[in-house]
Image (cartoon, rainbow, N blue to C red):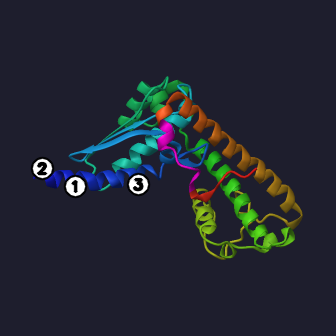
């Protein structure tokens, strides 16, 4: 019986690690696993115990709460997980965040009068930025493949190769944009096509968003390894093949 339980826990552990890989830092748009934010992950008899860390003790409580809460939701949904304990460590608000997440209280109930609202709007702001950055990457791939800037307003998702199409589809789905192959590539956050005369300006803006996100990611990775030298071994290069390109 013990060996069977251990085998089952090993299978669940793999699934838990995969689930944690779906949790993204909302500001950096990268999995917390790739960033090295997962300190440990243990499964015993169906109980998942996960410890998280962040680059500094004073990282924004908004983002800290989102990642801890998202990690809880992802792990708790794994088949075979009977209970989950997800804890953020070494943060100035760890106790409050961990208690709120464990109770599934929500951000407002956790922070009381300090919180103006739940974090859905904040999450959407950064999902839109992630879409803009991904759109710029996709456009650069098309231009490198021979597309003229003036022709980009006619491009659709079908014109992208994989994995660029899959990356952009995920970001579009996150903000409620069409994801079918015939959907126009160059649209704003509301799905409105970008006018041909605005394409150049829009892509310049998108480039600044992308560079900002990637720069913040590199900065946070550096801070994390300074704070926890051992975390360097847990970090992976920027996911989805989206290398930083200035």
Q: Residues within 10 Å of mark 1 (few under 14, many from 20)?
A: some
Residue 55 visible here: no
Q: Quick check: marks 2 and 1 in contact, CB under 8 Å? A: no
Q: Earlier in the sequence, mark 2 or mark 1?
A: 2
On whether residue 185 falls in the magenta region, the answer is: no
- Residue extending farthest to the left is 1
Tell me which residue sits at (62%, 61%) in the image.
Answer: 172
- Count of all numbered marks drawn on residues in the image: 3
Image: magenta residue range: 231-239
Q: Quick check: marks 1 and 3 in contact, CB under 8 Å? A: no
Pointer 3: what residue? 18
Measured from the top left, where is residue 7 in percent x and y? Answer: 21, 55
Residue 174 visible here: yes
Pointer 2: what residue? 2
Tell me which residue sits at (86%, 60%) in the image.
Answer: 200
Pointer 1: what residue? 8
Q: Secondary structure at mark 1?
A: helix
């Amino acid at each position: 019986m013990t060996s069977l339980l251990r085998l089952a826990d090993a299978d669940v552990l793999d699934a838990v690690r995969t689930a944690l890989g779906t949790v993204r830092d909302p500001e950096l748009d990268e999995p917390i696993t790739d960033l090295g934010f997962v300190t440990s992950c243990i499964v015993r008899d169906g109980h998942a115990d996960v410890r998280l860390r962040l680059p500094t003790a004073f990282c924004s409580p908004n983002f800290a709460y989102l990642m801890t809460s998202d990690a809880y939701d992802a792990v708790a949904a794994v088949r075979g997980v009977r209970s989950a304990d997800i804890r953020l460590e070494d943060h100035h608000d760890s106790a409050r965040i961990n208690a709120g997440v464990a109770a599934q209280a929500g951000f407002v109930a956790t922070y009381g009068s300090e919180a103006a609202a739940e974090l859905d709007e904040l999450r959407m702001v950064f999902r839109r930025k992630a879409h803009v950055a991904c759109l710029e990457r996709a456009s650069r791939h098309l231009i490198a493949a021979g597309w003229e800037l003036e022709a980009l307003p006619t491009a659709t998702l079908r014109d992208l190769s994989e994995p660029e199409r899959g990356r952009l589809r995920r970001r579009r789905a996150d903000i409620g944009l069409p994801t079918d192959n015939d959907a126009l590539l160059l649209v704003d956050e509301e799905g409105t096509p970008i006018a041909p005369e605005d394409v150049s300006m829009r892509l310049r803006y998108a480039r600044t968003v992308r560079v900002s996100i990637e720069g913040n990611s590199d900065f946070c990775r550096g801070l994390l390894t300074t704070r926890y030298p051992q975390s360097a071994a847990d970090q992976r290069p920027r996911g989805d093949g989206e290398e930083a390109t200035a």
